[in-house]
Structures are given as C-alpha cells and as structure tokens.
C-alpha cells in the first residue's frame, strides 16, 4: 500500500481533567427545531478576539478547548494566590486567594495610582482606600443562600485556631460588614461571575515585646490571615485565535464578535480578519477541515509548523500531527507560504519525530475558475479540496526483520 | 635459502605489480574486519598518551585496510565489454551468481546496466573491458556514469542499497492498474476549464466641482418653495479646511474601525429611508427584532452559519453539517499530469533482501518501494510532481533519496486521510 497508515494517538499518562463535550453547544434529540442555544460574546480589542465574560470563558475552553487564557499557559488559571502560602495555610480550607502583605500593599498602591490618574485628589484617594481595605470578619453576604455557607466557613476557621506551621497561630480578625460600598479600582465593572474580590492577607502580629530580650532568644513571629477586599483586581480573559473565533461564528453560530458594541457579520469578519492576517483564509480552511473531522487544532508555533492536531484535547492525548498548510491552484502549483528546501524539511521532520508527532503537509487546492469575488465569502470553501500528505523518514539500514511498513 | 617470511605478514607497497608470493599472501590473509570501535568518542584533545595511542591505532588500521590490494583469480572473473553507444555492458563469459538478481537478456546475450556493471566491478566479480583494454575502477566511474546512462548521484544510491542487501532494478511501470485505480476508473480525461469572467463594466465618472451643490428634487420640497443650484465655494473659504493631523493612536483607531465597522450609508435599508424619522423607525424595528429573533447579524445576512440550532442532535451530525471541504487523494488527477516531463523521475524498483532466494527476474512481483533520486540542494517536489510520480508508482510506496556529498537520507511522502474522530 502506498498510503500512510493511521496510528492511534498516544494517551497522556496522567490526566487531570474530565471530558465535558466536544463543542460548546448543547446536543440533544429532544430539542425542538427552533431551540436556541446560547450565543457567547467576544470583542475585538486591538485586532484580537477577546472573551471577557467568565461564564463564556469557562464554556468555550471547557468544551472544545478554544482559546488561551492571556495570563496562563493554556487554560485560564490565573490566580494571585501565592502557592507557598496556600501550602502553608492549607488547613484553612478556604477558596479565597492567600497573598503576602507586600503583594497586598502593591494592589493598594496601584489602585491609588489609578485614582490619582482619574483626577481624584490625594485626601479623597486615601480616604476611599482606607475605607475599602478595612479588615473583615468574613466576606459580606450578598444573598441569603450564601449565609449558611459562609457561616460554616467561618466556624471552620475558628475551630482551626491551632496553627500547624511552626508555632504560628492563624487567626482571622475582622470588623463589621460593608455593604454597598463603591467598587474602586475595578478595571471593568460588570458581571464578572465568581471573582476574587476578597483575599486573605498574611500579616505579622503586632509589635515585638521587650527589646531587652537576650540576643539569642528567638522572637516568635506570629502571622495571621486577615480578610480584606482587593482594590486592584486583575481579570484574566480568554483570547481566541482568528481561526477559532471564525469557526465559532461561522461553523457553529454560537459566538458573536463585537466591535465597539456592534456585532459583526460573517462576511465582514472574513474580510477584516484577512486584513489583520493576510494568510487567514488559508489557515482558516485547514482549521475548519480538521475541526469538521472532530480533531482539536491548536497553534503549531512551538514546533515550527502551523497546527498541532489533538484527539479530544490537549489534556488527554499528546498531539498526533504537526501540520504545514499550503494553498495551491488547480495545476497543483502555487507560491508557497513557506517555500521548503530539503534542509528545512529534514529539520522539521527531525523535530517532529523527536516529539513523537507525524509531520503532515496539508494542501488546499483551489480551482482555477474560482474568482477573487468568490474568495470574498467563506462559502468558497465548498469548492476547495484538501490533500493530506504524511512525510516520514525511511532508514535504509534498519534490521530487515524490523521493517513493517515504510 | 633464507626462511620464508609468514605469508600473511607480507606488506606490499602501493603502485607495484605484485609478485607470485605476494598474490598468495593476499589470498590467504585474514578476512575478519578489525574491531571498529576503540572506546567511546572523545570530543576534545586531552594531550594524554592513551588518547594519542588510540588515535594512532585507528589511523593505522584505516591505512592498512585502504592499502590492501584486491586480488582475484582470473578464472573467477566474468569478462564483460562496455558498449558506450548502446549504453550497456555485454558479458563475454557466462554470468555468475549475481545473475539471479542482476542483468537482463537481449538477443540471446547476457547484458548488464552500467550501474550494475560498475557495482560488480567494485565487488571484484567482473573484468570490464573497453576497446580490448581492462578498465580501472576510476576509469569505469568516468566512462559508465553519464547523463545519458545513470548519474553519479543515482549510482551512489544504487550501490548503497545493494550493499545493504536490497535487490535494485530499473523502474518498470506496472501495466496492471492497482485495485484503487480500477475502483476510481481513472482515465486520462481532461477537465474543461471554464472561460474567465466577462469584462467588467467601466464605471463612469463625471468630473464635478466638488463645491457645486445640485438643486434638490422638487418633489422633496414643500409646494411653494423653489430650490436652486448653488456653489458653496464662498462658504468653504470661511471654513478651516486644513487636513486634520491625527495622533498615532487616532490613526490606528481609524484603521481598525475601517476594518470592522460598516459604513452606515452603505446599508441598503438605510438608503431607503428618506427622512430622519424613517431612519429612527428603522433603528427601533431592528432593536425589537434583535431582542425577538436570533442574531440578525448572523442569520439575517447573505452568508449564515453552517449549523442552525435545531440541527445539533449529536456531535456526529454536527460534524456532518460543517464538513464542506472535500478530501482528495494523491493519485486523483495524476493521469493528466503524465504529459509533463522533466524534473524528477522514478529510477529504481527496490525489493527486500529476504526476497533474494525466490527472486525471478522475469516475474519479480510488486516492488517493496520505488526510488526517486535528487541532490540535497535541489528543491523539494511540489504537489504537482508528487501527484505525477505517485500516479506512476501505483500502489508501490515512493521514496525520495537525497544525496548530500555521499550522505544519503530517504524520505517518503504518502497519501493520507485523517479519519473522523467522534464518540470518545
């Protein structure tokens, strides 16, 4: 056989996630024909597609692995929590981030700077911040249902009064609730979903005792966690690549992209994205093709190619294929996005083999009768053909009994 | 007479004709190859005596091997004659064991291709003559490898594979269609290309003074009001018409806005509004529509999403709806590319070594692979060449051999179709 053989993808040894769904849309036979599904919302910010709503981010990444958190490696998982402190205070059993006092001071100073730039005078700034950053007993209750949960949390904390870390005693001190105070320092007010307005700050217990203590007597440093409000919150957004965004809009109809509060039509996106990224149409067609086969394409920058193909998603399997995309015409010729020499092809092949991926060349064949006008609409894809080619290296001196397929 | 030295210990200086004793010594010397490795590789000179000694031994072994004279019994060499005009070598005495996998019969004679003859010469199996004189290996390289026969690069690949034990024959295009081709019922049918677009209409442009304002249409005016044409030149002079200098930020913003925003005047519905009130009514209608119906910017447009909500019954069904790109295969359309020549060609058919015992030249069977040979500096074959060559190769895998100053690496481009992945 002259065709390449399909090898099953390699499962990752340790999987930390459960698989939710292949795509961020509801499936079901029992939905009526006019059943709507939720349309997520994204915005164009500086020629990038950004999703800000926390619920949307959760859905888009969790079902199909679309996008990347702007402050994370892949899944949006940014937290200001200091991992060392979290480990130290793990008996606290709290969801609030735990940060150092120094870090909290930075937040306060940033918020102050922001207010000064907004034109507030110094005394106002100080007054507002002093009020906002007062220590709290526990997070104020917003709804009645949460009261029980918070009480449990509080009692849990109280019962853990015995410190475990080196003789320190954790304690959470606080004053009265605060209600209806203004939200200062929020970059973008609005419904953000679950966020970390409340943080636990590790602060030193008040002043040391007698200074006349003997030099070799150890001063007991007592730290405690104080609940305060964070005046300068950082929100992590999800960034979608142009291909991912267009796919969600055009193929699934589950995303709307806004520019300055106006939603954009499909044709407009098709044109505008090409201006931002001149090779967008080519890369999009390949992206669409692989998605329509049920694979998850992610960017291939790490290995010098255009796409990496995953089965199910990055958390479950190692990427199976590393793909280079080219657009050619009816006579199977065309100016290439990346003209390859044998040297560069050999290098790419080596890199791919070293990371256990197969190198794939994906040719998109455009009929010569296709006009430029036709290319102005994504419907032109119906006339495009896709040719996949696997490039592999053959070793002539391999043991003859070893050679199964080429 | 002095005692004769050990036959195997006789050392022969290069360039001399060997004496009888030397010839015998050469025949009975040890056939064992020296151990190749003298320990792990050293990356830097360390000036030690041990390292110097290892290097010396390695070099000495190498020189000894290279200096060995090749000695064959005249009777066991097959005599052969090089025919340059015809491009083959004709055997003058009966062929030996090599005849099982090499050579061809023609007009009752036994013949060899130039690459086969050169290889056998290097092996010490034949005695190659040209104009009644025996050829040295160097002369044979020069005479037998030409552009009309087999190039040097192609010979290097040939001998590399032969030495690994493969059977290498000249390319024979299979006359039998592969089952795949029969399935596709491929013919050399030529697709008709449609004519290009008709000529575009030239847009007419009428030169106008840009300050001239035409008279308003009478039907738009109240009954007793007359409109007239006017030249706003005098008013324009009272305005500051200097071009506004935008900051970089403003310019960037404008560029971005131009990409993503629609010109409100380009909207046909807006154009149909003849008054401000009608426009406001339009906006209101749209607002109501937006809250009632599904997203009009997606569904109320000429191009709508591929999937509508009611169609999402299962992941497999969804994939079906969004699959608009067609898959194609390498051999598709390859037939009509056969007219193209030049560039890469398939040179050899390669059979595996364990097929040697049962190999029949008249009926070799399907090759293990077919070879195209190219220099490392030459361009990578484009899709056009890949399709043509893979069509010619049929269902035998095609391998590209790249020669880089004696180093040979092999790559294959194989047709592939990614399977659909659903239902994990």
Image: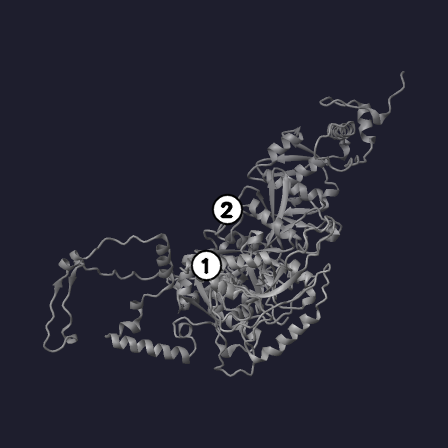
Q: Nearer the viewer, residue A77 or B217?
A: A77
Q: Which residue is mark 1?
A: A114
Q: How many marks?
A: 2
Q: Is residue A177 left or right of residue B80?
A: left
Q: Position of residue A331 (x, y in %)?
A: 46, 55
Q: Position of residue B266 (x, y in %)?
A: 30, 67
- Number of other residues with Cα within 10 Å of mark 2, as a class: few under 14, some 14 to 19, many 20 or more: few
Under tag 2, what secondary structure?
A: loop
Q: Nearer the viewer, residue B247 or B37?
A: B247
Q: Position of residue A88 (x, y in %)?
A: 69, 60
> Where is the C terminus of chain B found, in terms of image quarters?
bottom right
Q: Position of residue B230 (x, y in %)?
A: 12, 63
Chain letter for mark 1, please: A
Q: Is residue A186 visible?
A: no
> Where is the N terminus of chain B found, in terms of image quarters?
top right
Q: CA distance from mark 2 to mark 1?
A: 70 Å
Q: Is residue A160 visible?
A: yes
Chain letter for mark 2, please: B
Same chain check for tags 2 and 1: no
Q: Is residue B367 left or right of residue A24?
A: right
- Number of other residues with Cα within 10 Å of mark 1, as a class: few under 14, some 14 to 19, many 20 or more: some
Q: Nearer the viewer, residue B324 or B336?
A: B324
Tell me, yes or no, whether the two marked residues, 2 and 1, touch with CB atoms within 8 Å: no
Q: Which residue is mark 2?
A: B342
Q: Is residue B159 left or right of residue A124?
A: right
Front tag of 2 and 1: 1
Q: Is residue B72 left or right of residue A344?
A: right
């Amino acid at each position: 056989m002259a065709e390449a053989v399909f090898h099953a993808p390699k499962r990752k040894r340790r999987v930390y996630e459960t698989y939710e769904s292949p795509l961020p849309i509801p499936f079901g036979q029992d939905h009526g024909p006019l059943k709507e599904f939720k349309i997520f919302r994204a915005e164009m910010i500086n020629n990038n597609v950004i999703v800000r709503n926390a619920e949307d981010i959760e859905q888009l990444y969790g079902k199909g692995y679309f996008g990347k958190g702007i402050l994370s490696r892949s899944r949006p998982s940014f937290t200001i929590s200091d991992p060392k402190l979290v480990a130290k205070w793990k008996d606290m059993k709290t969801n609030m981030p735990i940060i150092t006092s120094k870090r909290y001071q930075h937040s306060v100073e940033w918020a102050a700077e922001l207010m000064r730039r907004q034109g507030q005078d110094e005394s106002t700034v100080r007054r507002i911040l002093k009020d906002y950053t007062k220590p709290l007993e526990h997070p104020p209750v917003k709804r009645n249902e949460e009261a029980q949960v918070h009480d449990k949390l509080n009692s849990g904390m109280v019962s853990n009064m015995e410190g475990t870390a080196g003789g320190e005693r954790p304690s959470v001190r606080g004053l009265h609730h605060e209600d209806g105070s203004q939200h200062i320092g929020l970059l973008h007010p609005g419904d953000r979903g679950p966020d970390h307005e409340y943080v636990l700050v590790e602060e030193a217990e008040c002043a040391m005792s007698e200074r006349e203590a003997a030099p070799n007597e150890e001063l007991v440093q007592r730290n405690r966690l104080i609940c305060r409000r964070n005046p300068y919150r950082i929100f992590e957004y999800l960034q979608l690549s142009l291909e991912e965004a267009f796919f969600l809009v055009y193929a699934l109809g589950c995303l709307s992209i806004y520019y300055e509060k106006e939603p954009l039509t499909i044709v407009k996106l098709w044109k505008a994205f090409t201006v931002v990224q001149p090779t967008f149409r080519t890369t999009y067609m390949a992206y669409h093709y692989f998605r329509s086969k049920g694979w998850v394409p992610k960017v291939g920058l790490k290995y010098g190619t255009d796409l990496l193909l995953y089965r199910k998603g990055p958390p479950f399997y190692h990427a199976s294929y590393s793909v280079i995309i080219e657009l050619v015409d009816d006579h199977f010729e065309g100016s290439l996005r990346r003209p390859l020499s044998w040297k560069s092809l050999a290098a790419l092949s080596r890199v791919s083999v070293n990371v256990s991926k197969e190198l794939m060349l994906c040719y998109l064949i455009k009929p010569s009768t296709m006009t430029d006008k036709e290319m102005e609409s994504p419907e032109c894809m119906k006339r495009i053909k896709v040719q996949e080619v696997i490039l592999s290296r053959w070793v002539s001196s391999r043991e003859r009994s070893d050679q199964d397929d080429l | 007479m002095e005692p004769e030295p050990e036959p195997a210990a006789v050392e022969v200086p290069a360039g001399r004709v060997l004496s009888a004793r030397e010839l015998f010594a050469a025949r009975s010397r040890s056939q064992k190859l020296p151990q190749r490795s003298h320990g792990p590789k050293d990356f830097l000179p360390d000036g030690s005596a041990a390292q110097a000694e290892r290097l010396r031994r390695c070099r000495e072994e190498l020189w000894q091997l290279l200096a060995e004279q090749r000695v064959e019994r005249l009777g066991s060499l097959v005599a052969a004659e090089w025919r340059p005009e015809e491009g083959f070598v004709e055997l003058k005495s009966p062929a030996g064991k090599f005849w099982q996998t090499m050579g061809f019969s023609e007009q009752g004679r036994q013949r060899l291709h130039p690459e086969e003859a050169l290889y056998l010469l290097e092996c010490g199996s034949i005695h190659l003559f040209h104009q009644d004189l025996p050829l040295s290996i160097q002369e044979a390289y020069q005479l037998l490898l030409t552009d009309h026969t087999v190039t040097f690069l192609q010979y290097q690949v040939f001998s590399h594979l032969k030495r690994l034990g493969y059977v290498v024959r000249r390319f024979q295009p299979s006359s039998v269609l592969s089952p795949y081709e029969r399935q596709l019922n491929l013919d050399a049918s030529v697709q008709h290309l449609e004519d290009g677009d008709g000529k575009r209409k030239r847009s007419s442009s009428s030169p106008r003074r840009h300050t001239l304002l035409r008279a308003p249409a009478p039907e738009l005016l109240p009954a007793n009001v007359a409109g007239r044409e006017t030249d706003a030149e005098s008013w324009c002079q009272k305005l500051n018409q200097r071009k506004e200098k935008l900051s970089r930020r403003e310019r960037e913003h404008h560029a971005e806005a131009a990409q993503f925003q629609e010109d409100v005047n380009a909207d046909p519905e807006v154009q149909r509004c003849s008054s401000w009130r009608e426009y406001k009514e339009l906006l209101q209608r749209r607002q109501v529509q937006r809250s009632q119906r599904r997203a009009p910017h997606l569904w109320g447009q000429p191009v709508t999403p591929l999937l509508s909500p009611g169609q999402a019954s299962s992941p497999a069904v969804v994939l079906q709806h969004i699959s608009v790109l067609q898959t194609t295969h390498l051999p598709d359309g390859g037939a009509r590319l056969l007219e193209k020549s030049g560039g890469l060609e398939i040179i050899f058919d390669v059979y595996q070594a364990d097929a040697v015992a049962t190999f029949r030249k008249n009926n070799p069977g399907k090759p293990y692979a077919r070879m195209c040979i190219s220099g490392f500096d030459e361009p990578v074959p484009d899709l056009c060449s890949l399709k043509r060559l893979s069509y010619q190769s049929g269902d035998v895998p095609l391998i590209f051999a790249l020669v880089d100053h004696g180093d040979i690496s092999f790559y294959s481009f194989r047709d592939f179709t990614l399977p659909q992945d659903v239902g994990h």
